[in-house]
Image (cartoon, helix red, strand yellow):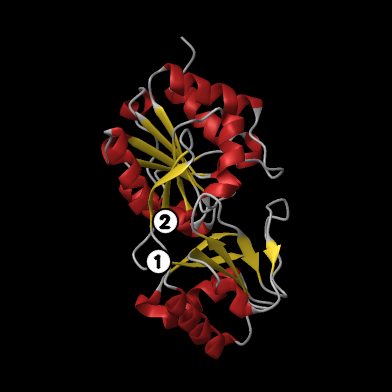
Amino acid sequence: MAAPTASDERTAYSLIATDLDGTLLRGDDTVSDRSFAALARVARAGAQHLVVTGRPAPRVRPLLDDLGSGGLAVCGQGAQVYDAGADRLLWSVTLDRELAETALEKVEAEVGQVYAAVDQDGVGGLTLIEPGYLMPHPTLPAVRVGRRADLWCAPISKVLLRHPDLSDDELAATARGVVGSLATVTMSGPGTVELQPCGITKATGLALAAEHLGLSPADTIAFGDMPNDIPMFDWAARGVAMANAHPELKAMADEITESNEDDGVAVVLDRLFPEG
């Protein structure tokens, strides 16, 4: 991990990319007053704030409204670039449902039964959960279906997996070992191991959104807390991990800030975008 240098202390970044859960959001799904104030200074300085999250576009829209953001957001682990002002997807890619079923079969052949959910594609897409699946974020809306086959009734952006006994790290490692090129496996939070379209990461969505904004990796500082943020850190000029971050992300971060509960994003933004 590199310590901040003098060059980092200037307002050098035109794009501030933040994860939501465990990063910008507190545990109660709110943004603190300090974080609101820091993001307001970012905007006054002419820089862009871009949410980059695993949540699908329909689950992000209320938060963007709270933030007063009518711009772009990267959703669904990079599978969607969402224009909040127009309420439309500028770009999206779906996970082939037959490949998803095959990937699930391969995982269950190794670890036994898992419980699955899917995020449907589109700005009106639902989150569907099969019997036995427990939502890691109980505040997020979901529709319970009667059987797994009902998960595949419409195009999907990703599959979410939970195992009754294995840890997230164990489930993710096993899934990566057996899924191969059928899907990209990510771990995005407690109880959240996901299958998404092969080759799609937060970095692919961030790169597309940045290009749309006329910005580049050199313009970007990224904040995150989980291994799914590693591609985003690799892409951006600087990556800042939260104090509560997964060890894999901390190991490759340029800087570690305070936790999400202690306004870690704002701590860094207060330094880079001071009052003045």
Q: Which mark is residue 79?
A: 2
Q: At x 62% / y 78%, what residue is drawn?
A: 148
State if disc 2 and disc 1 touch (CB < 8 Å).
yes
Front in this rendered view, residue 199 or 240:
199
Q: Amino acid at mark 2?
A: Ala
Task: Classify 12 as above or below 260.
Answer: above
Task: Classify 148 as above or below 79.
Answer: below
Q: Amino acid at mark 1?
A: Pro
Q: At x 53% / y 35%, what residue is drawn?
A: 265
Provide residue 79's location: percent of width, then percent of height. Answer: 42, 56
Q: At x 26% / y 33%, what residue is drawn?
A: 214
Task: Classify 197 as above or below 75.
Answer: below
Front in this rendered view, residue 248 or 120:
120
**Residue 163, visible in the rendered structure:** yes
Front in this rendered view, residue 25 or 122:
122
Front in this rendered view, residue 80 or 224:
80
Q: Is residue 26 left or right of residue 212?
A: right
Using a 10 Å C-alpha cutoff, classify the residue at mark 1 as few (fewer than 14 neighbours), some (14 to 19) or many (20 or more).
many
Q: Which mark is residue 148?
A: none
Query: Callout 2: helix, strand or loop?
Result: loop
Question: Label 1 belongs to which residue?
Answer: 197
Cα distance between the residues tagged 1 and 2: 8 Å
Q: Is residue 226 left or right of residue 99?
A: right
- Nearer the N terminus, badge 1 or badge 2? 2
Task: Give the number of callouts.
Answer: 2
